[in-house]
């Protein structure tokens, strides 16, 4: 990348996601790197290094984060401080800002003093951008979590802001398309006409489930599998069958596929239950559109269809090149924080 431009960064506990804008404010590229922060802050250094090797150093960067939740850190404030410091060190000559929810973008050196506003605020950035297209109900299904946010009057109309508050309100659901352990989605499953208890072991994840159902987008799963083996269909079936005490054989492969479809539906019901909880205390109209974002937004389209509700992509109103439009949904917070840095409103 030539000197100049802006990078939007979304630093999670498992991935670094980035959106590249040129000096004219046009979205040019998207990138995602594995970043397992629980293994050490050097993982962020490595991911940032790989990103900058590809794009070069920008004149501006705007970042948001959820990685402060990783158990590498003493608490969220410690995580915000250390993550902001690591990005500052990687971008010493870049104008670096941090997203702080209603306060919008603040200088990076102020992040530690406003840790409560900065921590896990990436959903707020996506909601601000999505809400500029009109009222709706944002559902962002990522690799690890799902965010559900009412959009009213040009902004989010949420009940909770912190992770704890949003877990209680149903606006944060700890289930995602990739990293969620299968045992977190169901306790029992139907096998051969009976209910069988799933083993309480990390033998398989929802990436295996969605790989078998055909709902895992290519490139969405960047982390090692539960058993460290390949991510192919036979291996996914083997891991999933292990959850119910079965081995993979030609006669059990259909069982694995049926089990995957059942678990995918159970996960969708969890999200739908949270959707009903949020709607039960929302001023939104009954025919409000569902606004999809995240690597799992195909599931949001499915929810809209079964509810007979309109659907729109979170970025549908933005000038984005066709070759980036579908992928940008995976990078919603990174693209949103970059967009807000270039075009967004001032702080409240």
Image (cartoon, helix red, strand yellow):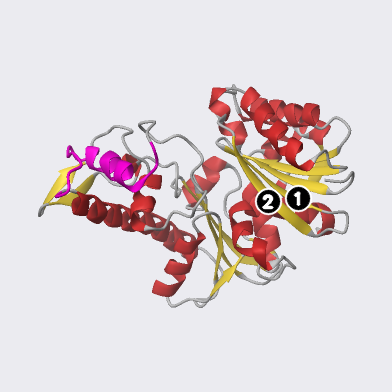
Say which quadrant the N terminus sits in: top right
Q: Residue at x 34, y 57 (%)?
A: 213
Residue 221: x and y in percent read 48, 44
Query: What are the residue bounds of the magenta stretch?
Result: 230-251
Work out how far the residue at label 1 is from the one at label 2, CA to CA, in angstroms.
6 Å
Residue 13 in sight in this render: yes
Question: Marks 2 and 1: in contact by CB < 8 Å?
Answer: yes
Look at mark 2 in the image and give the residue it sits on: 30
Where, by quadrant of the figure, is residue 307 drawn? bottom left
Q: Is residue 96 magenta?
A: no
Q: Residue at x 80, y 43 (%)?
A: 61
| Labels in figure, total | 2
Where, by quadrant of the figure, is residue 180 drawn? top left
35 on left or right of 29: left
Callout 1: SS: strand
Look at mark 1 in the image and give the residue it sits on: 20
User: Residue 18 versus residue 302: which sits nearer the camera?
Assistant: 18
225 on left or right of 327: left
Q: Residue at x 55, y 55 (%)?
A: 294
Residue 27: x and y in percent read 76, 58
Q: Earlier in the sequence, mark 1 or mark 2?
A: 1
Q: Is residue 234 magenta?
A: yes
Are there few (<14), some (14-19), or many (20+) residues within 10 Å of tag 2?
some
């Amino acid at each position: 990348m030539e000197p100049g431009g802006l990078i939007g960064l979304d630093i999670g506990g498992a991935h670094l996601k980035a959106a590249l804008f040129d000096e004219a404010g046009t979205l040019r590229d998207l990138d995602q790197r594995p970043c397992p922060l629980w293994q050490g802050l050097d993982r962020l250094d490595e991911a940032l290094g790989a990103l900058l090797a590809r794009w070069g150093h920008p004149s501006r960067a705007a970042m948001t984060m959820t990685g402060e939740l990783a158990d590498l850190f003493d608490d969220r404030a410690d995580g915000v401080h250390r993550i902001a410091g690591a990005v500052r060190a990687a971008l010493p000559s870049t104008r670096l800002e941090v997203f702080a929810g209603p306060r919008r973008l603040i200088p990076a050196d102020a992040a530690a003093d406003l840790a409560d506003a900065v921590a896990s605020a990436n959903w707020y950035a996506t909601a601000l951008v999505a809400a500029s297209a009109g009222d709706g109900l944002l559902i962002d299904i990522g690799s690890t979590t799902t965010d559900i946010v009412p959009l009213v009057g040009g902004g989010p109309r949420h009940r909770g802001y912190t992770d704890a508050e949003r877990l209680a309100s149903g606006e944060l659901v700890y289930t995602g398309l990739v990293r969620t352990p299968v045992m977190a989605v169901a306790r029992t499953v139907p096998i051969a006409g009976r209910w069988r208890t799933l083993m309480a072991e990390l033998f398989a994840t929802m990436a295996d489930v969605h790989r078998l159902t055909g709902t895992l987008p290519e490139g969405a799963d960047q982390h090692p599998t539960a058993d460290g083996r390949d991510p192919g269909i036979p291996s996914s079936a083997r891991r999933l069958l292990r959850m119910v005490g079965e081995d993979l054989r030609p006669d059990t492969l259909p069982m694995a596929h049926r089990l995957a479809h059942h678990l995918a539906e159970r996960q969708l019901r969890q999200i739908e239950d949270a959707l009903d909880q949020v709607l039960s205390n929302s001023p939104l109209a009954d025919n409000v559109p569902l606004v999809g974002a995240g690597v799992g937004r195909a599931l949001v389209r499915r929810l809209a269809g079964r509810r007979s509700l309109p659907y729109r992509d979170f970025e549908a109103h933005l000038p984005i090149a066709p070759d980036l439009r579908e992928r940008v949904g995976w990078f919603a917070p990174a693209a949103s924080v970059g967009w807000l840095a270039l075009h967004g409103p001032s702080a409240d």
